[in-house]
Amino acid sequence: EAGVAQSPRYKIIEKRQSVAFWCNPISGHATLYWYQQILGQGPKLLIQFQNNGVVDDSQLPKDRFSAERLKGVDSTLKIQPAKLEDSAVYLCASSLPTGVDEQFFGPGTRLTVL
Amino acid sequence: GEDVEQSLFLSVREGDSSVINCTYTDSSSTYLYWYKQEPGAGLQLLTYIFSNMDMKQDQRLTVLLNKKDKHLSLRIADTQTGDSAIYFCAVASNDYKLSFGAGTTVTVRA
């Protein structure tokens, strides 16, 4: 079974530039999560999708971050414009939709904002 | 979200047992998890425990839960060099959203 795929693995940009990350969840997983993991901290949930609908985006800085999952499969997370404090690893995870199921994590995208 | 606290570092000799501790604040937590993260990789679920249990054993891993003290621990028996990684405690609230600790870096020395 293929795991959660993410690209790119690494991205370096200058502040005020834009960046987008892509995630392809495990086939059949209706629930998709984006987490932000700052160095030395645990992952923090940014947004949760159930199919193509948003379940929770309370921690997403909506003035600069946006995410979509148009067809209920792949998802894109965008930052526009980026700030220095956005430097982090962005993790995508997916799970079956029953709530208690294991979340499977992708390898993450390491973003450095200069 | 709730607060989840872990010690930051643990150094252990190969073959010894490792014990990683975690405390949390929300007494209504439903599930409690231990994840492992190796360099450059995502998080891998190691084990989990329901809040109505006080112990779970899975091969070399033993999870202990003290609900009264809101304390969770992970014991790794016969620690190997491949166990060197960052270990995250995560706690699920009533709506199954996860709150993670900052992670404990475990270093296994020969």
Image (cartoon, grey):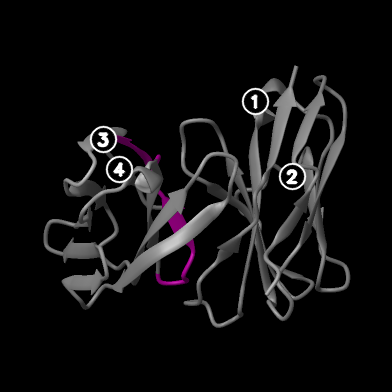
* Residue displayed at 20% across by 56% down: B77
Choose between B26 and B77: the one closer to the eye: B77
Kindly identify the amino acid type of the residue bearing the numbered disc 2: Lys
3 or 4: tag closer to the N-terminus: 4
Look at the numbered discs 3 and 4 and tell me whether their residues touch, using CB distance below 8 Å. no
Q: CA distance from mark 4 to mark 2?
A: 28 Å
Question: Which element is circle 1 on?
Answer: helix
Place of residue B106 in the rendered image (x, y in percent of width and height, measured from the top left) = 32, 38
Split into 4 quadrants, where in the image is the C terminus of chain B?
A: top left
Question: Which element is circle 2 on?
Answer: loop
Mark 4, residue position: B5
Q: Nearer the viewer, mark 3 or mark 4?
A: 3
Kindly identify the amino acid type of the residue bearing the numbered disc 1: Glu
Residue found at the very far top of the displayed protein? A114
Mark 1, residue position: A85
Residue A62: which disc? 2
Which residues lie in the magenta part?
Answer: B94-110
Choose between B100 and B1: the one closer to the eye: B100
Q: Are marks 1 and 2 on the same chain?
A: yes
* Residue displayed at 38% across by 41% down: B84
Q: Is residue A110 left or right of residue B11?
A: right
Q: Is residue B96 left or right of residue B74?
A: right
In this rendering, is residue B91 above or below A90? below
Mark 3, residue position: B10
Kindly identify the amino acid type of the residue bearing the numbered disc 4: Glu
Residue count near mark 1 (Cα–Cα under 10 Å), binned few <14, some 14–19, many ≥20: few
